[in-house]
Amino acid sequence: MPHSLAPVCCEIQIIHFGFALRPSAANFIGMTLRVFLALFVLIPFLSGCRSAYYSAWEKFGVYKRDLLKRNVQAARDEEKAASEQFKDALTRIKEMYGFQGGDLEKTYNTMQRDYDRSVERANAVHKRVKDVDAVANDLFKEWQKEIGEITSEKLRADSQQKLHDTQRRYDEMFAALKRAEKSMDPVLTRFHDQVLYLKHNLNAAAIASLKGESTDIQNEISRLLQDMNQAIAHADQFINTLQ
């Protein structure tokens, strides 16, 4: 049995609706729940299954508007986490350039960890931005379709205007998210170059030669942090309009 579906604490009986289940029954329920949750998470990523995903959420009273708000909040939080990670990386880079002797291998290992964590944060941001765009597009398509079902000309025009205003605010917010997202890759590329160079040249001369790159990468990280702060501010503004 795959580890992800392995039963936890099989010896312990589970009390379910007042009945003590045997380990085999408990294992079956545990496995079933895990499979259900895995499918629930995977549904939006399977082609043509997003409607089933939305229908499943609607049974709990959660609609596309709510999902969009949650995804924007999640994207904002990932931007914040990435921003903090890049700040830490910037601090470490500055410390490295001021290296005055010591354990070079420790310096390299610290830089490598910072790079790996930065990549993880960047990948999380990429995923969240895709999630936001997918739900927003589906929401706006549904909204436009339903406008056509309104028979009152006045109400239809009012709904159309609200859709237009919401799309405009969304476009501004999403542009800021994309700008910050795109700013990460050049920084990661330069960061990776320096980590690899340091790996291949664990000596004081290598750090001295990297000092020529210090201004460029520090400036790029500073611009990235500005883009991220703007994206976070735009996300907060958009979230407030969905209250």
Image: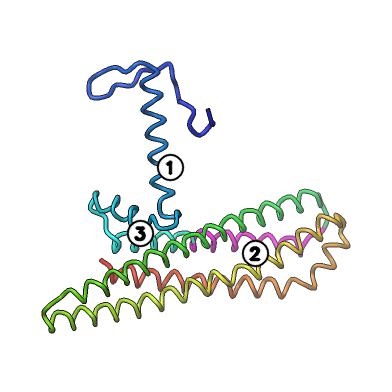
What secondary structure do most residues of the magenta stretch adopt? Answer: helix
| Magenta span | 79-100
Q: Which residue in the structure is indicated by mark 3?
A: 70
Between discs 2 and 1, the one toward the N terminus? 1
On screen, 178 above or below 56?
A: below
Classify residue 158 as left or right of residue 41.
left
Which comes before the other along the chain, label 1 or label 3? 1
7 vs 142, left or right, is right
Indicate the secondary structure of the residue bearing disc 2.
helix
Q: Nearer the viewer, residue 38 or 98?
A: 38
Label 2 and label 1: CA atoms lie apart by: 37 Å
How are the colours assigned in the image? Answer: rainbow
Residue at 49% from the left image edge and 63% from the top image edge: 79
For residue 21, above or below residue 80: above
The kind of residue on which mark 2 rests is: Leu
SS for callout 1: helix
Q: Nearer the viewer, mark 1 or mark 3?
A: 1
Who comes first in sequence, dot 2 or dot 3? 3
Q: Amino acid at mark 3?
A: Arg
Q: Nearer the viewer, mark 2 or mark 3?
A: 3
Q: 223 or 91, which lies in front?
A: 223
Asked if residue 33 is among those painted magenta in the image, a careful observer would answer no
Q: Residue furthest front?
A: 48
Mark 1 — residue?
Answer: 38
Q: Residue at 40%, 18% (x, y): give it.
A: 24
- Left or right of 204, for residue 220: left
Q: Residues within 10 Å of mark 1 (few under 14, many from 20)?
A: few
Measured from the top left, where is residue 37 in percent x and y? Answer: 39, 41
Residue sitting at x 84%, y 66%: 208
Identified at 29% across, 64% down, the residue is: 65
Circle number at residue 90: 2
